Amino acid sequence: MNTKKIGVIEVVAGMGLVLAGRKKEGLLTFAHGFYALEKSYRENNPRLEPGFKARWRESVRFYDATHQEPTNRTLHRWGIPVILASALGLLLTKPYTKPWWFSASAFALGWATNIVGHGKYEKNRPAFTEDPLSFVAGPVWDLQQLKTLKKAKAQHV
């Protein structure tokens, strides 16, 4: 199995472990998978300019290119904030308490909306399977999209 596949499996397994209440193991597995995906990304993009700024620009460009379908964009603008907030809830609450169950349900729902967006509308895989920095670029991109929508609505009023 190649490094990229292992990375994707570990990232997903890490999220699953956190979702199962095994925070430490989940975070370590996720981090190892993230590292494997980044290593694979850099091996497959040898002409990438050095430095974080260039890497960031490329990640945002890639994320934008893989999120063009309007319904998928809408699902992501809703799903990603839910995923972020619920992941925080999963990490900060005691497993299997009411707040934890709420966070676990929201986390699953947020991911489900993003998976539907990619599978049914965008017809591609989630960006993190190619570029792990998408875990950060995605939420930043979504905030930029919301600002753009807000500006457009304000100009039409």
Image (tube, rainbow, N blue to C red):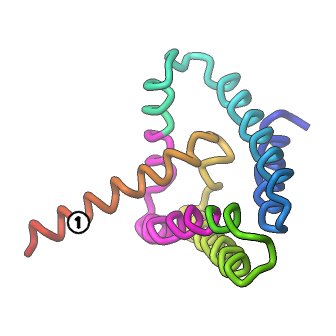
Asked whether the viewer can see residue 34, the reply is: yes
The answer to whether residue 147 is left or right of residue 22 is left
Q: What residue do we see at 77% from left, 34% from top? A: 36
Q: Quadrant of the C terminus?
A: bottom left
Q: What residue do we see at 37% from left, 56% from top? A: 143
Number of numbered discs: 1
Give the quadrant of residue 125. Answer: bottom right
Q: What residue do we see at 50% from left, 37% from top? A: 59
Q: x and y percent of residue 35 in the render? A: 74, 34
- Check the image and name the residue furthest to the bottom: 98
Q: Is residue 60 above or below residue 87?
A: above
Of residue 86 and residue 132, the one placed in the foreground of this image is 86
Where is mark 1, residue-wise? 150
Q: Is residue 71 magenta?
A: yes
Please give the range of residues in magenta: 60-87
Q: What residue do we see at 78% from left, 61% from top? A: 18
Asked whether the viewer can see residue 119, the reply is: no
The answer to whether residue 141 is left or right of residue 39 is left
Of residue 92 and residue 29, the one placed in the foreground of this image is 92
Q: Main secondary structure of the magenta part?
A: helix
The answer to whether residue 1 is left or right of residue 152 is right
Q: Is residue 23 magenta?
A: no
Give the quadrant of residue 93. Answer: bottom right
Q: Is residue 28 above or below residue 17?
A: above
The answer to whether residue 59 is left or right of residue 110 is left
The amino acid on which the numbered mark 1 sits, given as a three-letter code, is Lys
Q: Secondary structure at mark 1?
A: helix
Q: Quadrant of the N terminus?
A: top right
Q: Is residue 122 above or below residue 157?
A: above
Q: x and y percent of residue 3 in the render? A: 82, 33
